[in-house]
Amino acid sequence: MNVQDIRRQFPILDQEVNGKPLVYLDSSATSQKPIQVIETMEKYYKEINSNVHRGVHTLGTRATDAYEGAREKVRKFINAKSTQEVIFTRGTTTALNTVAASYAQAFLNAGDEIVITYMEHHSNIIPWQQVAKRTGALLKYIPLQEDGTISLDDVRATVTANTRVVSVMQVSNVLGVINPVKEIAKIAHENGAIMVVDGAQSAPHMKIDVQDLDCDFLAFSGHKMCAPTGIGVLYGKKHLLEKMEPIEFGGEMIDFVHLQESTWKELPWKFEAGTPIIAGAIGLGAAIDFLNEIGLENIAEHEHKLAAYALDKMSSVPGMTIYGPLDAAKRAGLVTFNISDVHPHDVATVLDAEGIAVRAGHHCAQPLMKWLKASATARASFYLYNTEDDIDKLVEGLVKTKEYFSDVF
Amino acid sequence: MSSNNLDNLYRRVIMDHYKNPRNRGILEDGSHTINMNNPTCGDRIQLTFKVEDGVVIDARFEGEGCSISMSSASMMTQAIKGKKVEEAIKLSKIFSDIMQGKDYDDDIDLGDIEALQGVAKFPARIKCATLAWKAMEKGLTEEEQQ
């Protein structure tokens, strides 16, 4: 894969920020969008914009075909059995909330257990807290190893016959670790629980096969994988989705509406009330085409190399603390760090003056921050358009940051 | 490094307050306590103060955060000590105006706070600077209403 060719397809990267060429190292927050995706959406609005599933007119049919065509692209992308198992949502957060509200809330009782891990993003914690509060279920956390990884022994010790839901992120947005979700799903199923996978940080970067993972639900967002904001996916096994009630009601999702009662459309539409995110879904379809052309395997390999390079270079900066495993083989393409006593906000501001965009803060993972004994950290995350040169600039910037604050400490 | 810009933000007096915070700690006796945090970044402050006869006679802060939030807290406590409650609240409003780049009453002697003016040019950092001031304004307004 030719990174320079790829970079040319991301016009946003070709600009100066604060007088320096932009080095975008915040793709875990949101990725940039290739021209192919931007043009597909532009074409949709210029040529076929229309509401879906209702018009008899030609544009309505074209829009419906494009929207449902995008669903088929998503189905193939994750190897779901049927498009009935692919629900378009606003993003990962909405997808996880849907599982919590529509499945867990309805089927869990007092004494049941929900199991998550210490490294989860707030969007895979709070919905379960709410379910626990409302049903009397117990929310349990799988602890982490010293290096931030999960041991299957700890999973076995935490998941019991009372566990009904296990929900785990496939890749951590802070530690960068890749969790063994397939093995965790097996343990969940042995105990009669369902397995939910938060794929927000994995879907953009590695091949996901829901049948191979045997997960019951998978949630991910478009905007982290070259698609626009506002579109995401909830995959669910058909037999589970069928017994779940919708959580939003209105147009588009109904079969018959009577005065006191209504009936729902079949899957997946019963979960898509209102005019759907048509342009977003079509943009996601274009992003999937783009990623497939390059190959998820190639992207994963590229990011893996970048992570190994970054870990090596960054470790050589004095005063550097790197969170998560130092073994690149256990990691995806992001590195979370702190440097000496410089607060990560100050690090991010000095890097920004160098044109380098990194994330600073608690990364929506306060329980994990507590575990790491850090109130905040900085994070550099990589995607298919990043290069070793970007990492060299980051390391230079970090050395400068340290020098800049050396008078203070 | 384009340090011109950065030097406007990280002024020497700011770094001095960061390294040697004034009024750091907790007031135990008869004081008002306000906890505030910035949920987007994890900065947090605990402000305690004591008011007698409508005058702030002491103020201390504890917390964690970046150089801007902690130095701003240090300067704020320094600035309000000895001030009447309404003067301190007025100062908070002036500070908010400075952060938004608005014109303010320049007859007022801002002392060290003047060094924080550069923050207005770094929109992402304004919330860092205003955290302690918001805590103070909330606490003193509550005090006034009692």
Image (cartoon, rainbow, N blue to C red):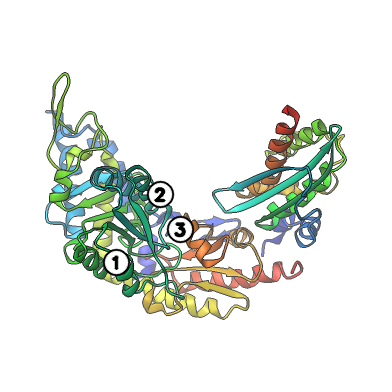
Quarter location, residue B71: bottom right
Which image quarter is the C terminus of chain A in? bottom right
Query: Disc 3 versus disc 2: distance between alpha carbons?
Result: 35 Å
Q: For the residue carrying disc 2, how many other residues have a C-alpha within 10 Å: few (<14), some (14-19), or many (20+)?
A: some
Pick the front one: A217 or A39: A217
User: Picture coordinates of residue A35 (x, y %)?
Assistant: 34, 53
Q: On screen, A369 above or below A317?
A: above
Pick the front one: B84 or A280: B84
The residue labelled by disc 1 is: A206
Query: Disc 2 versus disc 1: distance between alpha carbons?
Result: 26 Å
The residue labelled by disc 3 is: A13
Query: Disc 1 versus disc 3: distance between alpha carbons?
Result: 23 Å
In which chain is the residue bearing label 2?
A: A
* Residue drawn at the location 22% of the way across and 40% of the way down: A271
User: Picture coordinates of residue A260 (x, y %)?
Assistant: 17, 21
Name of the residue lying farthest toward the top: A259
Do labels 3 and 2 touch, CB within 8 Å?
no
User: Picture coordinates of residue A62 (x, y %)?
Assistant: 16, 38
Disc 3 element: helix
Label 3 vs 2, first from the N-terminus: 3
| Left or right, A101 with reference to A258 | right
Q: On screen, A249 above or below A277?
A: above
Query: Disc number at residue A126?
Result: 2
Q: Please name the amino acid that badge 2 sits on.
A: Ile
